[in-house]
Amino acid sequence: MKNQLWKHETSLLLFLVLLAQIFGLDDDNRSATEICSTHTILPGPKGDEGKKGDQGEMGKHGKLGPTGSKGDKGAVGDIGDQGIMGKIGPIGRKGDKGLKGLSGVSGGKGKAGAVCDCGKYRKVVGQLDINVARLKSSIKFVKNVLAGIRETEEKYYYIVQEEKSYKEALTHCRIRDGVLAMPKDEAANAVISDYVSQSGLFRVFIGLSDMENEGQFVYADRTPLQNYSNWKEGEPQDTSGQEDCVEMLSTGQWNDTECHHTMYFVCEFPKKRK
Ligand SMILES: *[C@@H]1O[C@H](CO)[C@@H](O)[C@H](O)[C@H]1NC(C)=O
Ligand SMILES: *[C@@H]1O[C@H](CO)[C@@H](O)[C@H](O)[C@H]1NC(C)=O
Ligand SMILES: *[C@H]1O[C@H](CO)[C@@H](O)[C@H](O)[C@H]1NC(C)=O
Ligand SMILES: [Ca+2]
Ligand SMILES: [Ca+2]
């Protein structure tokens, strides 16, 4: 652009020099500028219409208008989305116990066990079985004792409801720290006989026998019969020679009978240990 303008000026200067030569001023030592300032130049013809200008920039924002009037109430909105599920409530009270279900079908037969080569344990297990059996016997005894027992000032009496021979009965009472019952007076005999009849029994062994000397009855503690006895009428009557042990009938009366007979028996336990 600048270059074009320069060219334009150069051509104008050349034009003026040419004009000066035409008017006989070529000899003149004066410069072109002196020519321009000293000579009047007539205006040229009107130029062509210029090109259309470029589009102007966008105008500034207008001023804020006044507040409009209130609009009409809008239509009812659409139904909103379903809300998020609420929190879990507190734990409820425990329900009542249900009825007992029917018993299930019994399971299949188990597999055969492995052969045990643990001989040293067998002895221990065997001993354990014996101990368990003894414990069961003790528990049964205690249960029966709690169920029914009789007492006088000096003694407890207990009917063992297991059928034993006289010798087994003796042992049974002894291992319980007692002795086969020895009614030595009317009072003791009454307590035992009441106990027997109330238990619905007909006969029990008591601790009295003439095993050592026929006709010489002694108690289980080896004391002889003294001034108390309660033989049934006609007894003792050892017709067979085998009736060496004594049973008490529910009436409280005594009868000599065979020692190998088995029946229930009465143990007595002293209240005071000597
Ligand atoms: C025998 O009975 C009498 C009373 O009848 C009594 O005085 C005596 O002490 C009793 N004997 C024995 C050894 O208990
Ligand atoms: C007394 O004992 C004998 C021998 O055991 C028996 O035959 C008899 O019936 C018994 N008497 C009573 C009343 O039970
Ligand atoms: C041109 O002008 C200069 C001084 O401006 C002068 O020294 C010179 O002699 C002149 N030449 C002519 C031809 O008049
Ligand atoms: Ca006898
Ligand atoms: Ca008899």
Image (tube, helix red, strand yellow):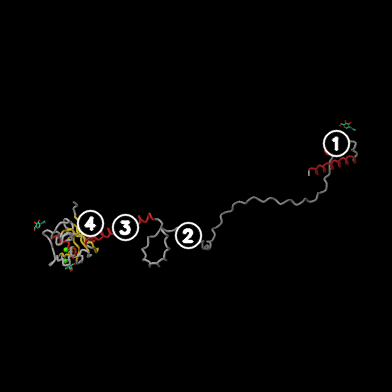
Tell me the distance, in whole angstroms, between the alpha carbons under discs 1 and 2.
Answer: 102 Å
SS label for mark 3:
helix
Name the N-terminal-most of marks 1 and 2: 1
Name the N-terminal-most of marks 4 and 3: 3
Residue 188 in percent (x, y) is at: 15, 60
Residue drawn where x is 38% and y is 55% of the image: 119
Between residue 231 and residue 270, name the one nearer to us: 231
Between residue 81 and residue 223, name the one nearer to us: 223
Tell me the distance, in whole angstroms, between the alpha carbons under discs 1 and 3.
Answer: 155 Å
Tell me the distance, in whole angstroms, between the alpha carbons under discs 4 and 2.
Answer: 79 Å
Nearer the observer: mark 3 or 2; the answer is 3
Amino acid at circle 1: Ser
Give me the disc on residue 215.
Answer: none
Name the N-terminal-most of marks 3 and 2: 2
Name the N-terminal-most of marks 1 and 3: 1
Give me the disc on residue 130.
Answer: 3
Question: Mark 1 = which residue?
Answer: 31
Assess disc 3: are there few (<14), some (14-19) or many (≥20) residues with their C-alpha within 10 Å of its C-alpha.
few
Quadrant of the rendered image containing residue 38: top right
Whether the residue carrying mark 4 lies under 8 Å from ligand 4 is answered with no
Amino acid at circle 3: Ile
Nearer the observer: mark 1 or 3; the answer is 3
Q: Reply above or below: 153 against 29.
A: below
Amino acid at circle 4: Arg
Amino acid at circle 2: Met
Residue 173 in percent (x, y) is at: 22, 58
Question: Mark 2 = which residue?
Answer: 85
Residue drawn where x is 47% and y is 59% of the image: 85
Between residue 127 and residue 216, name the one nearer to us: 216
Assess disc 2: are there few (<14), some (14-19) or many (≥20) residues with their C-alpha within 10 Å of its C-alpha.
few
Q: Is residue 91 left or right of residue 43?
A: left
Name the N-terminal-most of marks 1 and 4: 1
